[in-house]
Amino acid sequence: MAEERPARAEPLERPAQARRRGAELEDAILRAAAEELTESGYAGLTMDRVARRAGTNKNTIYRRWPNRAALGIAAYRQLAAAAVPSPDTGELRGDALELMRRTNRSWSSATGGILRALLAGARDDPQLLAQIQEHSADAGSAAWLAILARAVARGEAPAEALHLRVATVAIVLLRNEFIVRGYPTVADDVLIEILDEVYLPLIRGRGANAGF
């Protein structure tokens, strides 16, 4: 009977892809970090594991992100930005509701799972908590300011409404449902309530004309 040969061990690292540079390499690293967060949570996120998955080395990662907290936040932000583009329905209410629905779907998906993994890790990692606080302050402000600017141009909203905190109040309230209340997804009637009872009255009230 022929002697069985032991199975060949898999290499610990993927072959390095020397030609990858710049944005291509950064995308590969961020994808690898996102996959690690999805599979193992923040506790399992290490520079070694991300480097192996991305086919690069730790020094390459450290040159771009000084620690795993910064890397984890960067990975989440890239996915979140890609997942929720700015809508243009032709009216402020439609834009705001669609943007909230897209965000709700994103936060209920694997992308939201990464956010929850980061938030769970922040309980024991002050560095990560500081990163989350720093980068969550804008609450996707670019998209919200964009839809509000279009509303002002159409005459739907007063120019005084173009304020960062005003523009993002709806998404901050939605984020509260996920983070504080711990919901895995938010019911559509809650989105509509936030929009009709808080966001739109706040926008209209910013103008000098009370009937705006």
Image (cartoon, rainbow, N blue to C red):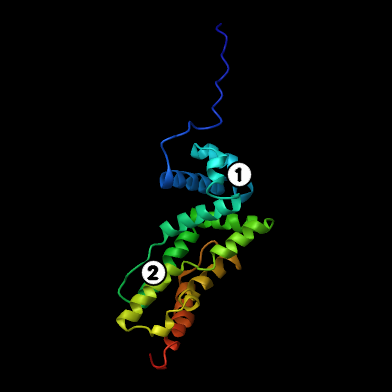
Amino acid under disc 1: Thr
Calculate the distance from the C-alpha at mark 1 to the C-alpha at mark 2.
36 Å
The relative height of residue 55 versus residue 91 in the rendered view (above or below) is: above
Residue 139: tell me if it is visible.
Answer: yes
Q: Residue at x 57, y 54 (%)?
A: 70
**Quarter of image, res 145:** bottom left
Q: Where residue 100 appears, x then y in whole percent?
A: 44, 69
Q: Where residue 26 appears, x then y in whole percent?
A: 46, 46
Q: Where residue 46 appears, x then y in whole percent?
A: 61, 44
Q: Which residue is mark 1?
A: 46
Q: How many marks?
A: 2
Tell whether 142 sits left or right of 53. left
Image disc number at residue 98: 2
**Quarter of image, res 101:** bottom left
User: In which quadrant of the rendered image does the C terminus lie?
Assistant: bottom left
The furthest residue to the front: 63
Label 1 Cα crowd, 10 Å radius (few <14 / some 14-19 / many 20+)? some
> Which mark is first along the chain, 2 or 1?
1
User: In which quadrant of the rendered image does the N terminus lie?
Assistant: top right
**Quarter of image, res 8:** top right
Residue 183: tell me if it is visible.
Answer: no
Amino acid under disc 2: Glu
The furthest residue to the top: 1
